[in-house]
Image: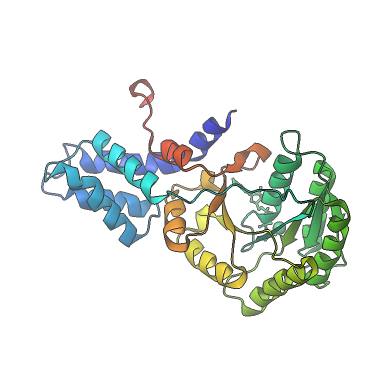
Amino acid sequence: MAWIDRLRSGLGRSRNGLIGSLRSGLSEEHDATSDPAEMIEEALIASDIGPELAAAIAEEAIASARGRRPALEDVLSQLRRILLERLEGCEKPLRLRADGEPTVILLCGVNGAGKTTTLAKLSSQLLGPDGSPSRPAVFAAADTFRAAAIEQLEVWGARVGAELVRHQLGADPSAVVYDAIGRVERTGGVLFIDTAGRLQTNHNLMEELQKIERTAEKRLGRPVDERLLVLDATTGQNGLSQGQRFHEAVNLTGIVITKLDGTARGGIVVSVWERLRVPLMYIGVGEARDDLRPFSVQQFVDALLEQPAPSQAR
Ligand SMILES: Nc1nc2c(ncn2[C@@H]2O[C@H](COP(=O)(O)OP(=O)(O)OP(=O)(O)O)[C@@H](O)[C@H]2O)c(=O)[nH]1
Ligand SMILES: [Mg+2]
């Protein structure tokens, strides 16, 4: 399936939820005294665009209707314009270094967000047939908490042809990263650092993440190239506090939003950008390798708000 179709299908629940509530809220049968701006606001909140932002967007969407009950098509086209504007500037491509130095990519996030699978998908896309196969990939198994985590990375490494740097279970993750940088420096390849899931409220684990980053920075003599937060879209508004805390800890360079296929709350994408202003680099809409792609505002807004053609409406 082409990416556009995967994205459309992955955002299906969000699109149907949002357009469905707008359609019923704005329909003729609906109580004529109800306020269309409020309807729109509620529909946006239900899709996880936070309350304040939803109110502002709803007001703006209704402005040109001047008191009349607007048609669904008009509201959708206003929302399309507003979301395109609001998300402007959030795209940022992931670039591999071109100066012969290794590119180092650190992935962090809460438990189960999709860090390890995102790492595997990214490495196979960046270095696979359509990437630059001449660059060797190294995986650092810096999640030393669980044997299964190291094994999972080992399996992925074998599958995508990456070398695995691992220590024993329970070892200091910073030491794994130190060694892995030594390994990748000899080849000028790309290092992907897989870290353990950690709650943003766990002080010790957040300090451990900072230590990993500091160690890498010292060893490299420069900051880690990409410090990516992997955010599970189904966690809703808690994602904002995750984003804030991880950003404070390691000064994120980008965000990957996963599992948009598992939620009707795709508006979280807009909330995350409005609140954090950290580039939205990738989105994930499924478990397959090709279900992760660089984030495109235009594609996202089209897939979220596009109505099915009348013949497919039912
Ligand atoms: N539906 C769906 N599932 C996803 C997506 N991204 C990841 N997953 C699934 O989420 C589950 C957890 O993924 P992992 O990559 O192991 O998550 P993790 O963050 O490394 O987890 P921990 O290391 O335990 O913290 C796996 O079953 C993935 O296949 C996505 O975009 N959509
Ligand atoms: Mg993992």
Q: Quadrant of ligand 2?
A: bottom right
Of residues 100 and 87, the one drawn nearer to the viewer in this rendering: 100
Question: Could you tell me residue 115's position as x and y percent?
Answer: 67, 55
The furthest residue to the front: 99
Q: Residue at horizontal 47%, vertical 37%?
A: 299
Q: Residue at horizontal 31%, vertical 62%?
A: 52
Question: Could you tell me residue 217's position as x and y percent?
Answer: 73, 68
Vertical position of residue 78 compared to residue 309: above or below = below
User: Which quadrant, please, contains the C terminus?
Assistant: top left
Q: Residue at horizontal 45%, vertical 54%?
A: 268
Left or right of 134 on screen, residue 223: left
Q: How many marks?
A: 0
The furthest residue to the top: 311
Of residues 4 and 84, the one drawn nearer to the viewer in this rendering: 84
User: Which quadrant, please, contains the N terminus?
Assistant: top right
The colour scheme is rainbow
Of residues 88 and 108, the one drawn nearer to the viewer in this rendering: 88
Q: Residue 298 falls in which quadrant of the image?
A: top left
Question: Could you tell me residue 207's position as x and y percent?
Answer: 67, 77
Question: Could you tell me residue 58's position as x and y percent?
Answer: 26, 51
Vertical position of residue 12 compared to residue 108: above or below = above
Q: Is residue 31 visible?
A: yes
Q: Is residue 258 visible?
A: no
Vertical position of residue 307 compared to residue 218: above or below = above
Left or right of 288 on screen, residue 308: left
Vertical position of residue 27 compared to residue 247: above or below = above
Q: Residue 284 falls in which quadrant of the image?
A: top right
